[in-house]
């Protein structure tokens, strides 16, 4: 299962850079980004960009988190929805055969 999140565009590029280069301290002035990363790490999950390396404003704000079950997904969605930079958090619809 996947939880998808959309964050504010101004924070999205900073978050993508932080995820690509975690050893660098790019989060100092981005408290919303820092809190989001801390929240996901605290849960023990991994935040990934859906479109890694993109800079297009329509693609850059989307990220995903793999979760083991619906209960964890609901907990992640509730927690991340409280972050100031998160515009949307939702369970990715399950794919079905045509």
Image (cartoon, rainbow, N blue to C red):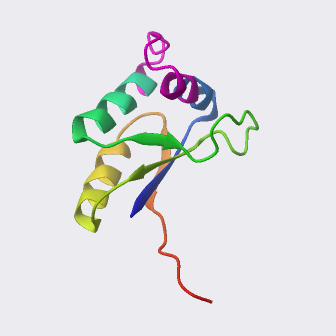
Q: Is residue 49 above or below residue 1?
A: above
Residue 70: image location, x then y, percent:
28, 67
Magenta-drawn stretch contains 67: no
Residue at position x 38%, y 46% from top?
81
From the viewer's side, name the closer residue of 66 and 10: 66
Check the picture and name the quadrant holding the N terminus: bottom left
Q: How many marks?
A: 0
Magenta-drawn stretch contains 27: yes
Check the picture and name the quadrant holding the C terminus: bottom right
Left-right relation of 46 to 17: left
Q: Is residue 26 above or below residue 19?
A: above
Residue at position x 27%, y 65% from top?
69
Residue 19: image location, x then y, percent:
49, 28
Residue 77: image location, x then y, percent:
35, 53
Residue at position x 63%, y 34% from top?
9
Left-right relation of 29 to 37: right
Residue 50: image location, x then y, percent:
58, 48
Q: Which residues are magenta?
A: 16-32
Q: Quadrant of residue 31?
A: top left
Residue at position x 57%, y 23% from top?
17
Q: Is residue 26 above or below residue 58?
A: above
Left-right relation of 62 to 26: right
Q: Residue furthest bottom?
A: 98
């Amino acid at each position: 299962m996947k939880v998808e999140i959309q964050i504010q565009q101004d924070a999205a590029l900073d978050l993508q850079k932080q995820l690509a280069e975690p050893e660098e301290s790019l989060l100092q002035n981005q408290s919303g980004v820092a809190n989001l990363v801390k929240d996901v790490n605290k849960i023990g999950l991994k935040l990934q960009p859906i479109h890694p390396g993109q800079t297009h404003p329509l693609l850059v704000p989307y990220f995903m988190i793999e979760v083991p079950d619906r209960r964890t997904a609901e907990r992640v969605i509730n927690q991340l929805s409280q972050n100031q930079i998160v515009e949307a958090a939702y369970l990715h619809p399950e794919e079905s055969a045509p």
